[in-house]
Amino acid sequence: MERIFEPGFTTKEFGEGSGMGLVVVQSVVRNMFGGSIAVDSRPGGGTTVTVTLPVPPQRSVDARRAGEPSAA
């Protein structure tokens, strides 16, 4: 489990996977959205992947309306 976010790590046979999937997901979640990703896995019990993203600050109704096109 500690290696799943390492570039090139895969559990598949040679030539069947690049080992970049979770690396890319982690990078996008952290760097583009400021979030986090956690994995919990138990043999015979499945795997849970939790992605946590911050909620952006709430804008006022007036500020949202200012950015909307007006009805003609």
Image: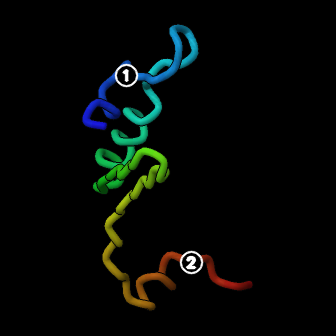
Q: Which residue is mark 2?
A: 68
Query: Which residue is at the front of the view, 46 or 26?
Result: 46
Place residue 31 in its image quadrant: top left
Q: Position of residue 12 (x, y in %)?
A: 51, 20
Query: Which residue is at the front of the view, 2 or 58?
Result: 2
Q: Position of residue 27 (x, y in %)?
A: 34, 39
8 lies above or below 24: above
Task: Locate the N terminus by quadrant.
Answer: top left
For marks 2 and 1 on the same chain, the one whose residue lies earlier in the sequence: 1
Task: Locate the C terminus by quadrant.
Answer: bottom right
Find numbered disc 2 in the image and state the secondary structure of the residue it sits on.
loop
| Cα distance in 3D space between marks 2 and 1 | 46 Å
Residue at figure coordinates x 63%, y 82% from the top left: 70
- Pick out the residue farthest to the bottom: 61
Q: Residues within 10 Å of mark 1 (few under 14, many from 20)?
A: some
Q: Position of residue 44 (x, y in %)?
A: 48, 47
* Image side of residue 13 versus residue 8, left or right: right
Q: Amino acid at mark 1?
A: Phe
* Image side of residue 54 versus residue 19, left or right: left
Q: Position of residue 71 (x, y in %)?
A: 70, 85
Find numbered disc 1 in the image and state the secondary structure of the residue it sits on.
loop
Q: Which residue is mark 1?
A: 9
Q: Amino acid at mark 2?
A: Glu
Place residue 56 in its image quadrant: bottom left
The label shown at residue 63 is none
Query: Which residue is at the front of the view, 9 or 25?
Result: 9
Residue at figure coordinates x 37%, y 82% from the top left: 59
